[in-house]
Amino acid sequence: MQLALSISPLKTPSLSQFPEPISLPLRPTHRVSLHPRNTAVNAVKGSGFVSLIGRVIEDEDFRKARAEVHRKGVGVEGYSIEGISVGGHETCIFIPELKAAFDIGRCPPKAVQQSFLFITHAHLDHIGGLPMYVATRGLYNLKPPTIFVPPCIKEDIEKLFDIHRKMGQVELNLDLVALDIGETYELRNDLVVRPFRTHHVIPSQGYVIYSIRKKLKKQYMHLKGKQIEKIKKSGIEITDTILSPEVAFTGDTTSDFMFDPRNADAMRAKVLITEATFLDEGFSIEHARQHGHTHISEIIENAQWIRNKSVLLTHFSSRYNLEDIRQAVSKLQSKVSAKIIPLTEGFKSKYT
């Protein structure tokens, strides 16, 4: 007598389906040794089922790496910060809550949605996407952006746009602002920006964005509401304007910016976004300085200057992978009180 067998395709289970240890039933015909090395699971080893489960659970580092690869942005001190920054390739960081983008190497799509663009210096991996940014905002009928640049490059930026207007026979509308170090520009009624000095191989500057709030002057704090209102109506200024540094962005720079007393606000902003191009002993501090960059060991050595709540590290060399970055950040985190977060978009895991 022949038996007809019906075989259904094997569905690969997920780990969430196994809240308890997996138990596989054995047919009575299987002889199973009670030796510790020859368990019931070993009896079906050749089926491939257990090896499949093993591959899923065996490597915690792989799961971490996969999560890092898929993460597109980070939440930092109430801000959603996204973008990409790979040394020598592309840098563009944007913060939707501020409608602001910092540098624009290749114009990521989400950068187009930001109304303010802050350029730190004129290297192509930080400025190459500038014409596309302006053109795309025009294509979508968005308001012409306000673009801030170091004064020394404003004239060349204007020429760049004139060339693109001529070649493409298109309108490129923008408000180009040459904002010098120490000057203040009002972005909206509760936000202002000031550039600060950085140190790269070509002229460069960082930016601090401040929130604005009003605080009643001390001499009026003892008064009641009606009294304060009467004084206010008389034209007397009864409040002080308080600027609180929210976000500081350095762009490419050596670690020297940390020691400048005039950069104190950058070092006490809630969030400092700065670079750490080199992470290991394969490149010396001197090499980093010669190329206008920062070695992460310099940040470790000068951790006492960091008063920020969080530090977002960017601009890692493309030589590194996710595991290299994570290991270096772990060493830095043990030396500083601020929360250290690496921006890893664009980097791959050694497991991929």
Image (cartoon, rainbow, N blue to C red):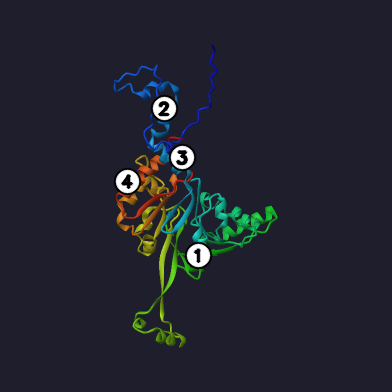
Q: Is residue 321 visible?
A: no
Q: Amino acid at mark 4?
A: Lys
Q: Which residue is mark 4?
A: 331
Q: CA distance from mark 2 to mark 3?
A: 28 Å
For residue 76, the mark is none
* Element on which disc 1 rests: loop
Say whether marks 3 and 1 touch (CB < 8 Å). Answer: no
Who's the residue at 55% across and 18% down the image? 4
* Element on which disc 4 rests: helix
Q: Is residue 255 above or below residue 57?
A: below
* Element on which disc 3 rests: loop
Where residue 110 sits: x, y (%)?
55, 53
Q: Earlier in the sequence, mark 2 or mark 1?
A: 2
Q: Earlier in the sequence, mark 2 or mark 3?
A: 2
Q: Earlier in the sequence, mark 4 or mark 1?
A: 1
Q: Amino acid at mark 2?
A: Val
For residue 348, the mark is 3
Where residue 176 sits: x, y (%)?
57, 63
* Element on which disc 2 rests: helix
Q: Amino acid at mark 3?
A: Lys
Residue mark closest to the camera, 2 vs 1: 2
Q: Which residue is mark 1?
A: 179
